[in-house]
Structures are given as structure tokens and as C-alpha cells.
Image (cartoon, rainbow, N blue to C red):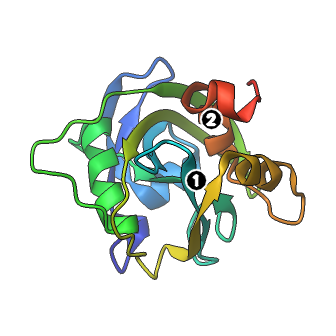
Amino acid sequence: MSAHPESELLAVYDAAGAVVGAADRGTVYRDGLWHASAGVLVRSGDGRRIYAHRRTDSKLVFGGLYDCLAGGVVDAGEDPADTAVRELREELGIALPAGTRLPLRASASWDGEWAGRPLRCHLFGYEVRHDGPVRHQPSEIAEGWWCEIAELRALLRDPARPFVPDTRLLLPGLLPDDIGITR
């Protein structure tokens, strides 16, 4: 994320999910414009553990909340699958081989509010298996850890550790049998 994230140029979508233009992040958030976000679920190589984290309090959206997806908004001219690979590298230091395209595993749309403002976002969910090192981007990730599915279920239920709401929308598609939650 740049020193001035509110000035970054994002892809603007219509309600149906087609790209219709671009606007700076500040305008997108202020005016509740439809945009897109890509998130990557990081599973251990054996699939039994998930990487979870707490977002820094300084994040523009969902600051301080818990999450299990590395992700972010789709930049102007960027494909959501490319956003997923970029965000995985930026947030968790997981670099995939050049040209890697993660297959889309889940999608949803958020048409609601955050912090009293409209938030409209098309969500794209991906998954990667990884057993190597994880290196947090300090401006985005406050802390992180590997957890078993049962621990993730407990985190999702714990009101003292609020979980990112847009990730909750994607989890039934990413972990339908493991989590036991529905939309």
C-alpha cells in the first residue's frame, strides 16, 4: 500500500460486475462506488491448517479485525486473479512463480455499509497451498498464525475478536465443508 492509499486508482464496476471505469480509492469509499476485491485463503500443504491474522488498526477498511484471507482491492486495469497474486506477495511475503494464475474458488458481492458509509464490492476468493515462510507487511498485518479448522471456527464465533465481514461472505465457497457456515 502506498503512503497515500486514498489516492490509488481503483477499478470501478457496475452492480452486475463489469468494469466501467476508474476512480481514486478515497472517492470509491466516500461515494460507495462498486469496486472489487480479491482474497487468498492460505492453506498448509496438507490442507489441515489455515493462515489467520489480525489487520492493523490503521487499515482504511476493517481496521483491527481478524481475517484469514490475504487480499485487497483491484487496481485500475488489473484482473482480480492478478490482484490475488499481488496481495499474497505484499501482505504475507508469499511469492508465487511468475505467471501463476490462481483459479477462482468463490465469489460474492457486498452491498452494505462500513463505518456508516456505503460499501459496495464484488469479492473474488482464491486458495493457495503453502508451507514456506510468511512475512507480514507491517503496515497491514498486526499479527498472524497458523490454525486448525476448529480454531478458525472458534475465531469466527468469538465476539471479542471481530472477523472481517466480506471474508465471511466468501468462506462458504472456500471452506464449505470445513467451516459449516452458509451465507
Quadrant of the rendered structure where residue 118 is?
top right
Instruction: Tell me the residue at 28%/49% (across/down).
Output: 85
Instruction: Tell me the residue at 49%/42% (across/down).
Output: 47
The residue wearing badge 1 is: 68
Q: Is residue 42 left or right of residue 157?
A: left
- Closer-to-camera residue (138/119): 138
Asked which secondary structure carries label 2, the reply is helix
Q: Is residue 139 left or right of residue 154?
A: left
Instruction: Tell me the residue at 43%/53% (across/down).
Output: 72
Q: Position of residue 124 (x, y in %)?
A: 45, 33
Asked which secondary structure carries label 1, the reply is loop
Residue 94, compared with residue 41, is above or below; it is below
Residue 69, compared with residue 5, is above or below; it is above
Residue type of the residue flagged with mark 1:
Cys
The residue wearing badge 2 is: 171
State the mark number for residue 130.
none
From this viewpoint, which residue is outermost toward the right? 159
Residue type of the residue flagged with mark 2:
Leu
From this viewpoint, which residue is outermost toward the top? 16
- Closer-to-camera residue (39/118): 39
**Res 75 seen here:** no
Which quarter of the image is occupied by the C terminus?
Answer: top right
Q: Position of residue 59 (x, y in %)?
A: 56, 70
Q: Is residue 62 left or right of residue 98?
A: right
From this viewpoint, which residue is outermost toward the left? 98
Q: Position of residue 56 (x, y in %)?
A: 59, 76
Residue 168, compared with residue 104, is above or below; it is below
Cα distance between the residues tagged 2 and 1: 9 Å
For the image, the number of numbered tags is 2
Which quarter of the image is occupied by the N terminus?
Answer: bottom left
Q: Are marks 2 and 1 in contact (CB under 8 Å)?
A: yes
